[in-house]
Image: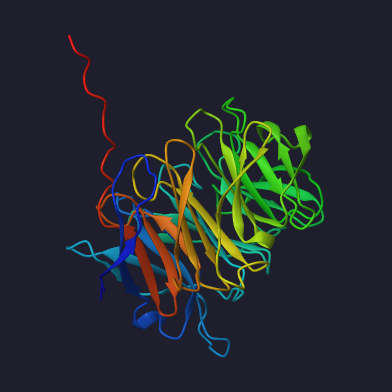
Amino acid sequence: MLILQLASIADADTCGEGPRELLTSEIPLGPSAIGGRLAALAVVDVDGDGVSELHGAVVPPLDATQPLGLWSTHPDASGVHQPGLVQPMHDLSVAGLHLLPGDLDGDGDMDLALIDPVRNEVTQILSLGEGFQISPPHSLQLGPGPSVGDLDGDGVSELLSATLLGSARAWSLRSSEPELKLEGTVPEGVVAQAVGDLDGDGAPEWIFARGTSSRLAVAWGGDLRRREDLRIAVADARDLVAMDRDQDGEDELFVVDRRRAGVRLLTSPRLRRGPWVVRLKQDGARDSPQSLSVADVDGDGCLDVVLHSFATHELAVAWGDDQGRFSPQWIPGAGAGPVAVGQLDDRPGLEIAVVSGEVVRLFGIAAAPEPGPTAPPPEP
C-alpha cells in the first residue's frame, strides 16, 4: 500500500531556483511486523542492485516471546517499496539500537552493523548480493554514540566507539570475529563521534563530543596519540556529522546542541564557531533526544540538514545554497522516529524516512529545483 499526497514547502534559497513541494508516502511495516516497532532504521543498497532499500530493527512488545527481527523493503515492478518478511534474530534491547551502514568486509557492497550499546553487542549483517549473512552477536566494550567509518583510508569501514570512562577503540568487522585495530584514551564523557577530513590532507580525523562538558576533541589523522582537546564549546553536543559543505576539500562539522534544540556549523580546520543552521520550534524539543542527517536531499548539488525531535515528532529541513546559507522549513507531526535519509526511487533527490507507528513515512521532493539564471554570452 502506498499513500501519496502533496505537502507544500515554501520557496527557499537554493543552488537552483524553484518552488518546494514534498511528496509524502507511507510504507506499512507489513503483517510479519504487526505489534512490533522499528527501533533503528537505515536506507542503503545492501543487495547491490543499484536501488536502496529500507532496513530496520523490529523490536517486539515487552511481553512477546519472539526475538527481534530484521525488517526490509524491496521495490516491486512499478518501483513501489513493499515490506518483506521479518528475518528472526536474537534478543536485543528495546531501546538505544543503532543500524549503521558501511562496507564492513571490503567487497564493495554496503553492509550493516547492528549495535546494542546497552548489552555491549554488535551483529554483522553482511550483503551476499541475494540476501544477508547475519552473524551471532559479539560482545565488545562499547559506549554511547558508536559510528562506522573508514578511519585508515583502506576502503573498509571500521566500527568506532568510545566509552564514558575515556577508552576509544576501532574494530575491523571483515571476518566472523571482530578484530581490534586501534585502542587509546580520549577525554571522559564522550557521547558522540564522527569521522571527517577537517584539514584536507586526505587522512580522516576522529572527532569526539563530550556531551554536557561542552568540549570537542580531535584525533588528527585518526591517530589517538595526536589528540587535541579543543577550546570551542557546544552546549550538550549529542550528534555529529562531518561533511564538506563548500567543496574545498575540508570537512565542516555539523553539531546538534540538544540544550538549544538546534544544529550549529563549525568550520574547519580548527572548528571555529559558525552560525546556527536550524533550530526546532515546538515546545518540548529542548533537552530531548534529537537526530541529525546531512545530505543533498533535493539533488541541487548543495548539502541540506535534517533535524528531528523524538519528543515532539517535529522534522526540520534546512535547504542549503551555494553561498553557505540555509533556509529552514518545519514539518510538524512527521513521526516519532527513528529517521534515515537515502534514495529509494528514481525521482530526483533523496527521501527522508521517518517511522510513525506501524508505517514509515517518506518525504521527497516532487521535482528537481530549476537551475538559476545563467549569464548571457559575451558580445563579439
Task: Work out whether 44 lies above or below 186.
Answer: below
Residue 123 visible from this viewpoint: no
Q: Is residue 186 left or right of residue 195?
A: right
Nearest the camera: 37 or 19? Answer: 19
Query: What residue do we see at 75% from left, 56% from top?
Result: 163
Q: Residue drawn 33% across and 72% down?
A: 27
How many discs appear?
0
| Residue beneath the point at 45% across and 86% down | 35
As displayed, is residue 371 above or below residue 314?
A: above
- Residue 339 lies left or right of residue 254; in this view the side is left
Q: Dividing the picture into quarters, in which one does residue 242 lie?
A: top right
Quadrant position of the N terminus in the picture: bottom left
Residue 374 picture location, percent across and down: 26, 29
Instruction: Looking at this view, name the residue that lies furthest to the bottom.
Output: 63
Q: Position of residue 312 (x, y in %)?
A: 55, 73
Q: How is the image coloured?
A: rainbow
Q: Residue 299 at x, y = what percent?
A: 34, 45
Q: Is residue 362 visible?
A: yes
| Position of residue 124 measured from the top left corner of the image (x, y, whole percent) | 53, 58
Residue positioned most to the front = 379
Residue lying at the far top in this picture: please name it.
Answer: 380
Q: Nearer the viewer, residue 15 or 53?
A: 15
The quarter of the image holding the C terminus is: top left
